[in-house]
Image (cartoon, rainbow, N blue to C red):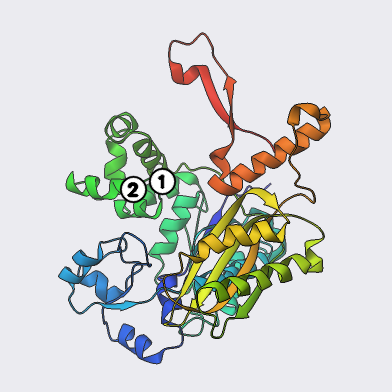
Amino acid sequence: MRTYVRMVACVHLPRFELVVAAGERSEIIKQALAGKALALAPPPGSDQRVGEVSGGAEACGVARGMLLGEALARCPELILLPPDPVRAAETWEGVLRGLESIGAAVEPARPGLAYFETSGLRGIHGTDAATMAAAGLACRSAGRSLAGGGRPPRIGGGPTRFCALAAALAVRSRRPLLIGAQSTREARRWLAGRPVALLGFREATAALVEPLGRLGVRTLGEMAKLGRAALTDRFGAPGTLAHRLACGEDSPLQPRRLQERLEESMEVGDASSGSALKRVLGVLVDRLLARPERRGRTLRAVILSAQLVAGGGWRERVVFRQALSDPERIRLALSVRLLLLPAPACALQLAVEGFGPPASEQGALLDEEPARRAIRLREAVAQMRAVAGQDAALRAVFVDPDSRIPERRVMLTPVPE
């Protein structure tokens, strides 16, 4: 009987947000092809750090997340493009839905980077290579609106998420690269020769790239030889995670939940700011609540976005303290966010990111029946996770109360919804 190694596929669209910001402007595309230094300008109200950069900017020493002043000092010819988070989110959503159309359960990491497992798709597409080829075709079809007509993504495969990312970044052709298809030991050997800069693609380990470089550690293999205890003693939990990743260990994927897409948009005309813009927002709220697809459900989280008159866009995620269906309270919560608009807007859009239960009245938990109380507690847990992520609601479980090591006495585990 033939056995299969668990395979995770990574889909990587290089410089996705920069390509989206370029849009259909042919002069920007020509400048990028000519090797000009391009970078995304810092979003208004941020800490003035540049976004994604082109290859020409990287050659001048400019990197993503660098302070704007330092970037301009290193490359005075740097061309800044206004970011367009609205169009980037819409285009990326189309790419994710294209991947889901081939049957993949996708975990999006950030715009331009996503993962899915291929084991459940072998019965549909035959092999892992055929599955990844189908994923590349789906991404190309979904990304037709990108500059360059939807260039093929870089796709890599490996037994873990991190190994698949390393394979995708090593791809130099349209053909997917599979690492460790025969054994996980092969994947660990291959990872040993990869640069430590790969840790920069994980938020938890990105801060280790610079200190490891100062210590003279260039590859993941060199870092793994330092030992997990030494890395943990020096860097704490990020050091432990970095060693696990270099040894071919990683956490399981967490695919996103499929939800209905419900949105309303409206051009504002002369109402580009002030009280008139709030009235336009009120119309969007009324239209959204009147949609039959809502089916009486409350709104837990929404996305408020705007197209700016000067170019680019603005996007704000709003999670309500309590799932709402009252238009007045929704308008009050969103009108405060309109004050964050960096420039006059030419269009507003309101989209639902998460629904709540049909009823959201608050009452005393202790006065309700146990079954009803459990339902409301599960809703509270879901609300917390919508605000702060999956690790926002945890419970303590006593594993070894008599242990002399405090970390072994109690373990945190997710609260079931």
- On residue 216, the disc is none
- Comparing 274 with 155, the one in front is 274
- Comparing 262 with 126, the one in front is 262
**Proximity of marks 2 and 1: CB atoms separated by less than 8 Å:** yes
Q: Is residue 61 left or right of residue 24?
A: left
- Comparing 235 with 285, the one in front is 285
Q: Report x, y in % for residue 244.
A: 41, 39
Q: Quadrant of the C terminus?
A: top right
Density class for disc 1 (Cα within 10 Å; few <14, some 14-19, many ≥20) is: many
Figure check: 416 above or below 88: above
* Residue 342 visible within the image: yes
Instruction: Determine the image quadrant of residue 264.
Output: bottom right
The secondary element bearing badge 2 is classed as helix
Density class for disc 2 (Cα within 10 Å; few <14, some 14-19, many ≥20) is: some
Amino acid found under the numbered disc labelled 2: Ala
From this viewpoint, which residue is outermost toward the top? 402
Figure check: 327 above or below 360: below
Which residue is under mark 1? 188
Which residue is under mark 2? 192
* Cα–Cα gap, marks 2 and 1: 6 Å
Residue at the spot x=43%, y=15% of the render? 405
Amino acid found under the numbered disc labelled 1: Arg
Residue at the spot x=76%, y=44% of the render? 361
Q: Is residue 408 left or right of residue 268?
A: left
* Residue 2 visible within the image: no
- Comparing 51 with 192, the one in front is 51
Q: Is residue 278 left or right of residue 22?
A: right
Q: Report x, y in % for residue 127.
A: 63, 62
Figure check: 307 above or below 89: below
The secondary element bearing badge 1 is classed as helix
Q: Report x, y in % for residue 74.
A: 16, 69
Q: Report x, y in % for residue 262.
A: 70, 67
